[in-house]
Image (spheres, coloured by chain):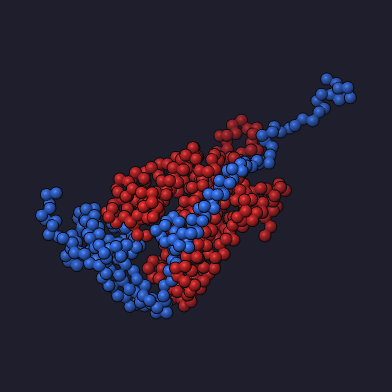
Amino acid sequence: MTRLDGRRSYDGGVSLQSAPDLPAEPEVERLSPVARRTRLAAAVAVLAVVLAGSVWGEDDAFPFGPFRMYSTRADPNQPVISTRVVGLTAAGEEIRLSGGQVGLRRAEFEGQLPRIADDPELLGLLADSYAERNPDAEPMVEVQVIQRHIELSGGQPTDEVDDRVLVTYELDTSDDDSEDGE
Amino acid sequence: MSTTAQTPQSGAAESPETAPAVPGTPRWWFRPVPLARIAVFRVIAYLFIPIDVFVTTAWVRAHADVPTEWYQPLLIGRLLGLPTPTHTVVLVVQWALVIAAVAAATGRAPRILGFAVFLLYAEWMVIAMSYGKVDHDRIAFLVALAVLPTIGRARFRDRRSSEAAGFAMATVLVAVMLTYFLAAWAKIRFGGWDWPTGSTLTRAIVRRGTDLSNWTLDVPYLLPVAQWVMIAFELASPLILLVRSERARIGLVLFLLGFHVMVYAGVTIIFLPHCIAILSILPWEKLTAGRRRTALPTPAQPTPSTAAS
């Protein structure tokens, strides 16, 4: 077709690329004012609880408690204390219980020390649970909580090491024989 | 440092994703984030959960075999009346959590599955922390799980960015920052202003030292200096809220992960869930955008989709 101005129909500009191939400006998905306000309010509320937990809370307030990893100051001249819980066999051999053998870690024992001191029977439950899961193990006669004190001098460890037994719980071994009927 | 001249588009410097904003203002909280970044980070976060449950913190599962008398419920457990973690309770929560997380990683039903994963992981943490020891390495990860479902759909090839995604990533960034900043505060609160002059690091290395860290015990003043540096960096952590450009994001992530790897080498403690939360800072959309760009120039080929792989 010839137009009135003399140009042919194919003289017009032709777009060479189809629209989807064009590197169009990425769009932004906006939030409604209500959605924004709700989110800000939630953020402020959670922040307030977290800050309050850090100022007044204790570990008990997890997940809002203080971030106290390695926050206690260790005195450079006081000994480093490392706790372990062991079962003792009749022959006096130690069976370690505080390295995950009964599902609890060293730090968990340390966190419950006051409870263990008040109620040493808790240790008996662990010994039972250990014996149940390790039927071939040498039977234990008692369970001990032992604290190793490693002396420091000017912040550096010395060879002075001292083990102190904190709690001893004697297991009732005679019972095991009479109860074998289950 | 100039971060322009990276892309051919001159508009890159003014893109809404990297526009300057004062931390804490609504403009900052809702600065858009590409949805493709969310799509990638979501897979990382949800697939980390089975690894966390079965490998890296398998001691949580071990609580299934601990006599329930040893359970010492946290405040939240007492307030909400959460069940005592018997053997069955621990196993049920474990499998529900792992299945929900793997399902959520597919990107389907992001709101419902994401919310379920958050609730189950929170309960998993209650089981973890209720035996006398509370860890502080997963608040930012918990926050990430809480906010991911608020974003909704996000696909790898999504070119859009979203304010909802921006808000979610801003909250994770704040949680990461507070993990450091409030750690400094806790040192002052519990350890006192003289915390850095104490022997906290010595104690940590005596108790859990490795071949890579035991030598530090013999170098005078090294560990106290490290303590000063640590608390100074922690107090400076709000600066990370200023991160904007891609280069700054990558640099920040490398710095933070470097710190955590160093701590791991020294005392074999790694804040793994926290490190996963840190990964949310990275501009993951570059990965998926790169793949698309290489796929685009071959539309004329007869079998473009199979040829790409």
Position above or below: A156 against A98: below
Residue B164: % across, % down: 58, 44
Q: Position of residue B180 (x, y in %)?
A: 51, 61
Direction from residue B134 to residue A44 in the image, left or right: right
Identify the residue at image location x=47%, y=65%.
Answer: B186
Q: Quadrant of the N terminus of chain B?
A: bottom right
Q: Colour of chain A?
A: blue
In this view, A28 is above or below A138:
above
Asked if one can make out residue A178 in the rendered structure from this viewpoint, the answer is: yes
> Which is nearer the eye, B283 or A21?
B283
Q: Where is residue B29 drawn, in percent x and y?
A: 60, 51
The chain coloured red in the image = B
Determine which quarter of the picture holds residue A14: top right
Furthest-left residue in view? A178
As drawn, the residue found furthest toward the bottom would be A154
Depth check: give the residue in front, B230 or B254: B230
Residue B247 visible? The answer is no
**Residue at image coords 59%, 57%:** B241
Residue nearer the viewer, B128 or B13: B128
Q: Is residue B144 above or below residue B305?
A: below
Which quarter of the image is occupied by the C terminus of chain B? top right
Which residue does the image show at 42% across and 61% down from the upper left?
A58
In this image, B28 relative to B58: left or right? right
Q: Position of residue B58 (x, y in %)?
A: 36, 53
